[in-house]
Image (cartoon, grey):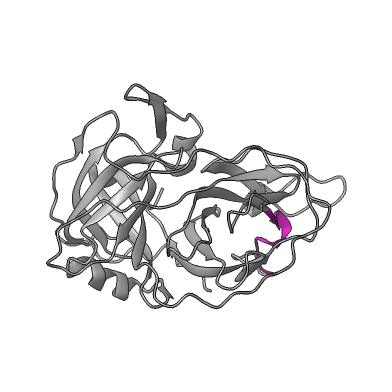
Amino acid sequence: MPMPNPTDRGTPRRVAWLTLLVAGGGACGPAVRPPDPPWGPSSIAKLEARSAVAVGGRQIVVGEMCPQGAAGRPAVVPLVQRTGAWDDTAEVLASTIERGSAPRFVVFGTDGKAAGVFDTVGLADIGIARDVASGTYVGASPCTAAGGKGVRLEDPACVPATAGCGLAVAEIVRPDDAPSTPTFSTGGACLSGDAIAVDIDGDGQPELFPLASALDPIRGPAPEWSAAPAGGPPCTPSFQLYDIKLARQPEPGKPVDTRSVITLDVLGVLDLDGDGRRELVTAMRFPTVRTILVYAAAGSPQRLELAGEAEAFPR
């Protein structure tokens, strides 16, 4: 899948702005299960149990919400949608937003719970690679987590990695349907040695996806990401992970060329399409561009396929 051109910003046009409404504390959001216990190593890999590709399933739009993404106003950049299949075409996503089929996005905090909701009003061109959804956001910063008694605590590692933006998901509905706040089953990921451990199918045993396989031979996102055959050291999963370095090994005696370093962030682990297997939403930070990817396990939890990729808000 070709990388987007970071210099192609388009021609700015008029943008309809709406007011950002911020209300701290718990916003109405999805009910999620508590984090799983720390994972331990397994002696052998699980057998690859293939299942039929789900027919139908949830129809959703995955985006990134930035409270100040559109010249200081809240906006959602739509990245990938799923109807009968996954699609990251900018024109298709713009049409979904423009006809009012994604009226409400739930915006996730760092703990996988809702930080707030974004209500879509229209489509706007802010001069980036794709049009964004304009509207109003009510809630707390996506870089916060529930701290009890209505208090939200900020994760200091989140803002440097995401610029204060957060994963946002809307359910695709008929344009005349009243907005509702969607809920999703969430999970977590963690670093187990040199692999990311994710329980894709919710059976309590994580799949291990080697960091060395996250990139293709030309240093782009891998179209498929297969699990390793053996277990790794135990780790404690969390909804998001930041600053995982995907760097070439330097030649002996030479330092790492920082221009070649690609940073991987896990933005969320959740079942987007309702098939019982969780999707992995990540961001790759390249030297000149940041792109968001959705990996889905269509037939087996042992193999993730790149369902969609799109450039996020510029940094």
Task: Residue at the far right: name it.
Answer: 252
Q: Nearer the viewer, residue 97 or 32?
A: 32
Check the image and report above or below for 313 versus 237.
below
**Count of marks placed on residues:** 0
Which residue is found at the position 73% from the left and 46% from the top? 256
Check the image and report above or below for 195 versus 302.
above
Specify whether 76 is left or right of 300: left
Q: Quadrant of residue 95?
A: bottom left
Specify whether 149 is left or right of 231: left
Query: In the image, residue 110 lies at what x, y percent?
Result: 45, 38
Q: Nearer the viewer, residue 262 or 63?
A: 63
Q: Quadrant of residue 10?
A: bottom left
Q: Nearer the viewer, residue 132 or 255?
A: 132
Task: Residue at the far front: name it.
Answer: 203
Which residue is found at the position 15% from the left and 68% from the top? 175
Res 190 visible: yes
Q: Is residue 208 magenta?
A: yes
Residue interval drawn in magenta? 207-217
Query: In the image, residue 40 lies at what x, y percent?
Result: 74, 42
Which residue is found at the position 47% from the left and 49% from the top? 186
